[in-house]
Structures are given as structure tokens and as C-alpha cells.
Image: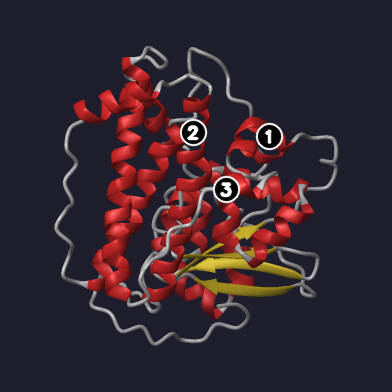
């Protein structure tokens, strides 16, 4: 939601947010799975096979020795089944990204990877898989496709370790590191948007798809809504029904994000709350838009780039972004309000 807040008619049991658009959520999972399978997993494997970094026989031997991964029993509830797919996709993508570790035989240049996946020659592009149209059939096909890719990731990891290309334990360490990045993923997204106008345009119009370009696992994302702060508009994010939040992009939400005080005041008087609780004075001539995150759409803010930062690199710019600025309660490059100040401003909810 953007602009003035209006009540949503969500039908859900306490503590359980129902998906309003299961088809859109499943479509997003399909799109992400096919992207990372074709452009990150299988293209990289083909590169290593073609150049002899990983002989085909080693891959077959690893496949025979790999432990069996059994398909889990699907949940009966449709929402739970889709959310399980979201979690599974996140773990799968993290495993795929772990394969980007350096190998002993040689480095894999970005340009070589782009060539291998068909960026420059469509004849080399791996085909997209088709999925059934009926929702339940599509979900069943997705579950099998996930299992197939999970088996392939495990096999490639084992083959690289067995052949001495990667030391044992390196993949686990890489996966742990990827899982611990948290809100810094959001900072990376913002910094790229600041320096790359075309990326920012894609991000605003096709958020989830564009984030893939930075190799960020999607997590339980659904649809990613992007709100850009400008000279005339300031955006703030809330979840009025529970505490929906794009955890894999922004880490855990600030403690106050879950409080009734924040939810009630940001709706009733966003300008006053930002001033009193967060020491953020939004000029009267600037419109404030409140965006309500749901199970289907999770929002994040692109804060304005601080003045005088023209000489900073993309990596340096990312350090100016804070978790608070990603939801609109602080400006990038400025120290956020203290917990005590926020508690006082939200009527003592600490």
C-alpha cells in the first residue's frame, strides 16, 4: 500500500498470515528457481566440465556416493506448502551461491560465466523448464524440481571436494557466511541503486527479479515492493497485522517494528511519530507515504543518497545505509535514534 493508509481485509487466524495471491507467490518461486538453476548452477557446472576443472567421471562417482535426499511430505495447508517452498528455495540458492568459491585449478572469470550461460550467444542458453498451469500441479512439479537441483548441488560439492578442488568444510563455511549477511544485503541493493540508474529503474518496477543480479537469496519474500525517497516524497514501512518483513534482505526488524505503538502511530500521525520517536523531521512540503507489508508484498525503502558522497565507491556507499533507513525511520548517513528515545516517542513501549 502506498499513500494514505487504508484498512486491509485479511482473513487469517491469529499468528498466521494467509497469502492473498498464491499464484503470484508460486510464479515468483518458479522464476527465481529457473534463474539460479540456469545462470548460476548449471552454467557454472558446464564451464567446469568443459575446461576439465571437474571431469565428468568425478561427477558421476560423486553422484553414486552422495546420500539420498528424500522428498519431504507436503503440508496439507496450501499456504504452509508455498511457504515451505520459499524456505527451500532460499536454502537451495544459498547452496548454489556457495559453488562460487575459488577452485584449485583456476579462477572462473565473470565474463567466462556470462559467455557460458548464453548472455552473448542465445544458442548457448539453457532452456527454461515449463510447469503445469493448475496451481497444485505446478507446486508438485516445483517440489520435484527443487529436489533435482538440491541433488545436483550436493553432487557438485562432493565432486569438488573429492577431487581436491575445494577443501572439506569450505562450502559449509561459505553457506554460514551467506546466511549471516542480513540487512547488509539491503545496503548493497541501495548502494547499487545509487550508482546505477538503470538498475534502480529495474529495481523499482521489478524488485524481486532485479535483486537476483546481486546474487541475494530471496527467502520468504513473495513480491518485493520498492519505495524510493525523493525531494518530494518520504516513505515509511510498517506491517499493521503482524510483523511481515523481508528478513533475508534486511535481517531482523528493529525491536520497535513489532510494537503496537509503532504500528498505531505511523498510521495515525507518521510525520509526528518520525519527529518525536526517531528525531527525523520531514519538511511539511514533503509527502509521507506509509507502505503496509503483507504476506504477499514485503516493502523496503531506497533512502536518498547523502550529499557530498560523489567520490565514494559503491562499497563505501553501502556503509552509509542503516537498517532504520531501509524502512524510512532514518536518513542514510545519519545516526539513528537511540532505543530509549524511540521508546519515549512511542509512549514508553520498551
Say whether disc 2 or disc 3 marks the residue closer to the N-terminus: 2
Which colour style is shown? secondary structure
Image side of residue 41 versus residue 334, left or right: left
Q: Do the residues under discs 2 and 3 have CB atoms within 8 angstroms?
A: no
Which of the 4 image quadrants contains residue 140?
A: bottom left
Say whether disc 2 or disc 1 marks the residue closer to the N-terminus: 2
Q: Nearer the viewer, mark 2 or mark 1?
A: 2
Q: Is residue 33 above or below residue 78?
A: above
Please tell me whether mark 2 sits on a helix, a strand or a loop. helix
Which of the 4 image quadrants contains residue 132?
A: bottom left
Q: Do the residues under discs 2 and 1 have CB atoms within 8 angstroms?
A: no
Please tell me whether mark 3 sits on a helix, a strand or a loop. loop
Where residue 252 appears, x then y in whole percent? 42, 50
Number of marks in the rendered image: 3
> Which label sits on residue 315?
1
Where residue 139 appears, x then y in whole percent? 30, 66
Q: Which residue is mark 3?
A: 125
Q: Whole-Å distance between the Cαs marked 2 and 3?
A: 11 Å
| Image quarter hosting the N terminus | bottom right
> Which label sits on residue 34?
none
Please tell me whether mark 1 sits on a helix, a strand or a loop. helix
Say whether disc 1 or disc 3 marks the residue closer to the N-terminus: 3
Seen at 33% across and 22% down, the residue is 57
Neighbor class of circle 2 (other Cα within 10 Å; few <14, some 14-19, many 20+) is some
Image side of residue 132 versus residue 196, left or right: left
Neighbor class of circle 3 (other Cα within 10 Å; few <14, some 14-19, many 20+) is some
Where residue 299 appears, x then y in whole percent? 53, 64
Name the residue nearer the viewer: 16 or 149: 149
Q: Which residue is mark 2?
A: 46
Q: Whole-Å distance between the Cαs marked 1 and 3?
A: 31 Å
Q: Whole-Å distance between the Cαs marked 2 and 1?
A: 31 Å
Amino acid at each position: 500500500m502506498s499513500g494514505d493508509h487504508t484498512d486491509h481485509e485479511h482473513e487469517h487466524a491469529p499468528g498466521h498470515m494467509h497469502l492473498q495471491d498464491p499464484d503470484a507467490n508460486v510464479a515468483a518461486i518458479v522464476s527465481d528457481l529457473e534463474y539460479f538453476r540456469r545462470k548460476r548452477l548449471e552454467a557454472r557446472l558446464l564451464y567446469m566440465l568443459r575446461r576439465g576443472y571437474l571431469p565428468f567421471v568425478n561427477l558421476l562417482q560423486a553422484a553414486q556416493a552422495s546420500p539420498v535426499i528424500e522428498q519431504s511430505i507436503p503440508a496439507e495447508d496450501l499456504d504452509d506448502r508455498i511457504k515451505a517452498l520459499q524456505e527451500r528455495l532460499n536454502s537451495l540458492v544459498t547452496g548454489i551461491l556457495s559453488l562460487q568459491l575459488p577452485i584449485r585449478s583456476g579462477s572462473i572469470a565473470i565474463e567466462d560465466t556470462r559467455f557460458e550461460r548464453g548472455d552473448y550467444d542465445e544458442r548457448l542458453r539453457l532452456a527454461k523448464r515449463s510447469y503445469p498451469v493448475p496451481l497444485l500441479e505446478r507446486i508438485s512439479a516445483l517440489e520435484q524440481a527443487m529436489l533435482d537441483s538440491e541433488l545436483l548441488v550436493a553432487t557438485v560439492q562432493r565432486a569438488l571436494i573429492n577431487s581436491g578442488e575445494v577443501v572439506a568444510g569450505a562450502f559449509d563455511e561459505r553457506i554460514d557466511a551467506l546466511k549471516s549477511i542480513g540487512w547488509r544485503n539491503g545496503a548493497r541493493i541501495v548502494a547499487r541503486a545509487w550508482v546505477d540508474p538503470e538498475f534502480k529503474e529495474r529495481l523499482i518496477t521489478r524488485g524481486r527479479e532485479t535483486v537476483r543480479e546481486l546474487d541475494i537469496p530471496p527467502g520468504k519474500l513473495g513480491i518485493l515492493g520498492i519505495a524510493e525517497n525523493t525531494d518530494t516524497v518520504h516513505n515509511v514501512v510498517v506491517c499493521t497485522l503482524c510483523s511481515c518483513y523481508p528478513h533475508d534482505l534486511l535481517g531482523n526488524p528493529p525491536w520497535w517494528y513489532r510494537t503496537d505503538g509503532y504500528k498505531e502511530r505511523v498510521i495515525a500521525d507518521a510525520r509526528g511519530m518520525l519527529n518525536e520517536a526517531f528525531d527525523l523531521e520531514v519538511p511539511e512540503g514533503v509527502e509521507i507515504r506509509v507502505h503496509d507489508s503483507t504476506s504477499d508484498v514485503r516493502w523496503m525503502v531506497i533512502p536518498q543518497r547523502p550529499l557530498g558522497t560523489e567520490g565514494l565507491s559503491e562499497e563505501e556507499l553501502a556503509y552509509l545505509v542503516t537498517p532504520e533507513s531501509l524502512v524510512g525511520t532514518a536518513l542514510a548517513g545519519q545516526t539513528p535514534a537511540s532505543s530509549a528515545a524511540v521508546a519515549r516517542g512511542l509512549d514508553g513501549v520498551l
